[in-house]
Image: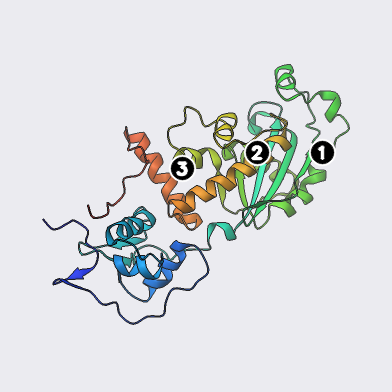
Amino acid sequence: MTPLFGTGSEGGRERAPDPAPPPRAGGSLVERAVGALRAGPRSTDWIAREVLRLRGPSGAAARAVFTLLGSDLRFQVDASGVWRLDPALPPPGPALRTHSFAVVDVETTGGGYGKGHRITEIAVVPVEDGVVGEPFSTLVCPGRSIPWRIQSLTGITDEMVAHAPRFDEVAETLCGLLDGRVFTAHNVQFDWGFVEGHLLDARGEAPSGPRLCTVKMGRALVPGLGSYALDAITRHFSIDIQGRHRALGDALATARLLVHLLDAAEREGASDLEALDRLVRERGSRKNRGPRPRSGLRRRQPPPF
């Protein structure tokens, strides 16, 4: 019985790859695969040998190729195990780790910005090349009282923010920290809603770059957790939170969480932001349709050696 996916043999002889320069040594394995396939289609054996540098049994090597590329929609493979780039999808963008991330956490007076609630504390933690950088944090005078239940949760009192800077006094600094970076937060819609509202009121504009949600990333990349609240998912990665429900403590923990999730995304073959977005959306839509495989995304399967 002929396997659904072979290893690039035709007529009993291995298909010889067209002449091409070897993939460049730098970058992730997915980036190297993209570079090789831009020169033309390549067999599974060729990718295993020239991209993954595998010299072991062909069955194990083929499985490694399918594990690396099988869930990335930019790659196509035919019945003979020959891979090519999907011409209908855009070429890969900058690798995930080459992006600069601004991990943000805000504490607020409670409900939504549109209902008159305001930020009481904000922290921004940069992440560059997988390294957590020097954080910025400040209390913010919200111009209104903080409900008692919120004071009990965060420990931030009316007295603490009474002489803190107003948001418009720190807006310039915050824009400098956010510009050119991927805005990242745990439940990004909440944090971004407050930051955007404040910036629009203070400056008439807000950064328009990409935004990343570590809750959605966690659900896609770490399936099976009972909860994806910050306490639960950081516990999964053995990340301590120093100062829970304070902007700096939560932002630092989220930044460390982001580093773990970027590692997981790269292992899943999401080599750039667009591939990560597709992976998160695909796994989210499968969850909404009902039960899903443990891995979260049905993969194209390697040959059954």
Q: Residue 7 in the image: state x and y as whole percent.
A: 24, 64
> Extreme front residue here?
56
Mark 2 closeness class: few <14, some 14–19, many ≥20 residues within 10 Å? many
> Extreme left residue here?
1
- For label 2, the SS is helix
Q: How is the image coloured?
A: rainbow
C-alpha separation, residue under disc 3 versus residue under disc 2: 18 Å
> Which mark, by number, is residue 221?
3
Residue lying at 20% horizontally and 64% vertically, measured from the top left: 80
Q: Name the foreground residue: 115 vs 251.
A: 251
Image quarter where the N terminus lies is: bottom left
Tell me which corner region of the image, top left, top right, bottom left or bottom right, holds residue 140. top right
Amino acid residing under circle 1: Arg
Tell me which corner region of the image, top left, top right, bottom left or bottom right, holds residue 138. top right
Residue to which mark 1 is pinned: 166
Residue lying at 24% horizontally and 68% vertically, measured from the top left: 8
Amino acid residing under circle 3: Leu
Q: Residue 24 in the image: state x and y as whole percent.
A: 48, 73
Amino acid residing under circle 2: Ala
Residue to which mark 2 is pinned: 253
Question: Considering only order in the chain, which callout, 3 or 1, is on the residue closer to the N terminus?
Answer: 1
**Marks 2 and 1: which is nearer the front?**
2
C-alpha separation, residue under disc 2 versus residue under disc 1: 26 Å
Question: Considering only order in the chain, which callout, 1 or 2, is on the residue closer to the N terminus?
Answer: 1
Q: Residue 133 in the image: state x and y as whole percent.
A: 71, 51
Compared with 213, 231 (above or below) is above
**Marks 1 and 3: which is nearer the front?**
3
Residue lying at 84% horizontally and 28% vertically, measured from the top left: 160
